[in-house]
Image (cartoon, helix red, strand yellow):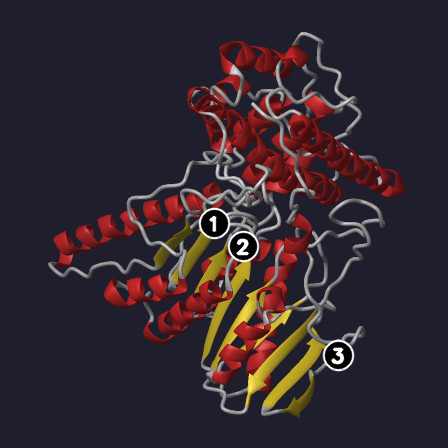
Amino acid sequence: MRNFKLKRSLTLVVASSMLSLTVVSIPTVAQAAPACTTANFVTTCVGATSDTAPYMMMVPANFNGTVYLYSHGYRPNVPVPAGIPGYGGYTVTNTPEPAPGGNATVIGTLLGKGYAVMGSGFARQGWNADSAIKTNVELIDVFKKQFTKTNKVVAWGSSLGGFITQALAEQYPDLIDAAAPLCMASDIGPLMTMAGDALWGIKTFFDPTIKGGNYSAGAAGYAESMGDLVKVFTVIGSLQAAIAANAATPAWPATSKVPDAIKAIPSRSALVMIALMSGIPLQSAHFDSTSAPAGLSATSTLSFQLAINPALAALENVANAAALAVLATHDLELQAGGAVFDNTATNYAARIADEQFIWSSALSGVSGIGGLLAVLAASPRAKADPAAVAKLNSLTSHSGEVEIPTILFTGTADPVTVAGNQQSVADKYAEYYAEKWADAKAQKRITGEYEKPKNNLLVLWNFPPEKYSKYTATGSPDTSVPAATGTNHCNFSTKQLLAITELLAYAAENGKNLSGGKLFTTLRKAGGMTFDREYSAPVMKFYQD
């Protein structure tokens, strides 16, 4: 097989998904009442809730009584020094977002239709669900007092903001009328297991000096976590260069300490192993796992499709998950008071028992699989602090039980909040709905009256196209093109976001989700949105342990 060149760094999107666009300057001092100005028929109010969380409200002159409350996603709770790839120069910000990423088209469209928008920057960054829920509850009250015409509140959010939105729907159905958790994080345990497995895999195969958790207190722990970020991206860069130099048998990074016999296995196979054992998808922003450049021989084409393309997808996605693991692990250990990732009892062979046959070529066959699993089995494991885990488990979790119309939407190849996050909430609701059916039938036997329970959950998926990898005339992967739909973290088009706002408006007004032909028409016009009762995303690996 001929070699090929990667012309640019693989796109790492965690930073852009975490960081927020500044919409407007806001006061830094908490205010008892919002400060409002009116221009171009829109009143903009800024202020802070009692916990010092800054907020923004935008209300059109023709306000129709419905306000959209948006919750932003995870932002690092510590600054990231300049020079760290993908993150360098980040400073902690609590700028509020009244719409995803401050999308001006979404905001303008909603305001033009008479809807108001608002959002908080929250008092704390990092994993802040418990405090953010309280902030949003207070913010709803502030808005209603300021704009007494308010009669409907719809909540939506992305990533961690999706977690917050789902919790609002479950805990405060009297405060909001409809909800849309997007690309949502599910309970923190499964999410951190996925991220922790990815980081531990990079440490085990490629650089054992990565600490990977159990960070020290104070400044020392911060320095350790930033050092881990540097090491993770150094490994990713080394692997990228190795695959570019020799896609068939790329070398291992110089920092790797695996036995020399294992280094006879291509390093790309270890990447695929990390993705499979942690549950990270093998479709990424630019690699569909099945395409190959034009002009290759039949044998080379098949090898590229089965072995190289999946490794390139793993390279993009594992980088995202491992970076999340470093930042979120440091954050959550500070909150919980100790190490929270534990894989002492994890059976990684069982984790990949089924998938190893599907991806056998990418894993370098039976001998490659056996060698890589042997490394995992022999490597020192990470042990959590039981008290810290108990504290982590005390944080807000989801029951899946919603009494208001709720819309879930995510990409099936999201590498950060993988599709299993959304599936877990959908499964919990399915159990709850089944209980409601049973209760209704029991009531009929007693009273003779039957009332069909309302299905309050609409589950939507964003599937990537079957083929979307692009290659240059020389056969190099083209990573300059936009990420494929259904991939990357919270990678939604403006049309898709506007479709969600339409579905929310209908749900709030009618007390139920849109269905039938009108639903399918809305989804078709937006593109990349699918309603399929028969589809079920793979469960997160956490649930297999």
Mark 2: amino acid: Asn
The residue at the point 29 percent across, 44 percent down is 534
Q: Which x, y percent locates residue 454?
A: 28, 60
Quarter that holds the N terminus = top right
Instruction: Compare residues 500 and 428 and report the one nearer the observer.
Output: 500
Q: Nearer the viewer, mark 3 or mark 1?
A: 1
Could you tell me which residue is drawn at 71 percent across and 10 percent down? 259
Q: Amino acid at mark 3?
A: Gln
Residue 456 lies, with reference to residue 201, above or below; the image says: below
Examine the rendering and report whether any part of residue 55 can be seen: yes
Q: Residues within 10 Å of mark 3 (few under 14, many from 20)?
A: some
Q: How many C-alpha atoms fall within 10 Å of the one at disc 2: few (<14), some, or many (≥20)?
A: many
Q: In x, y percent, where is residue 38?
A: 65, 91
The reply to whether callout 2 and callout 3 are in contact (CB within 8 Å) is no
> In the drawing, what numbered circle is on residue 486?
1
- Residue occupying the point 65% across, 26% down: 201
Does the image show residue 347? no
Q: Secondary structure at mark 1?
A: loop
Residue at the far top in the pictured view: 261
Between the C-alphas of marks 3 and 1, the distance is: 41 Å
Residue 189, image x and y in percent? 57, 38
Label 2 vs label 3, nearer the camera: 2
Using the numbered discs, state the Cα–Cα distance from disc 2 to disc 3 in whole angstroms. Answer: 35 Å
Farthest-out residue, left: 448
Q: Which mark is residue 31?
A: 3
Q: CA distance from mark 1 to mark 2?
A: 7 Å
Q: Are marks 1 and 2 in contact (CB under 8 Å)?
A: yes
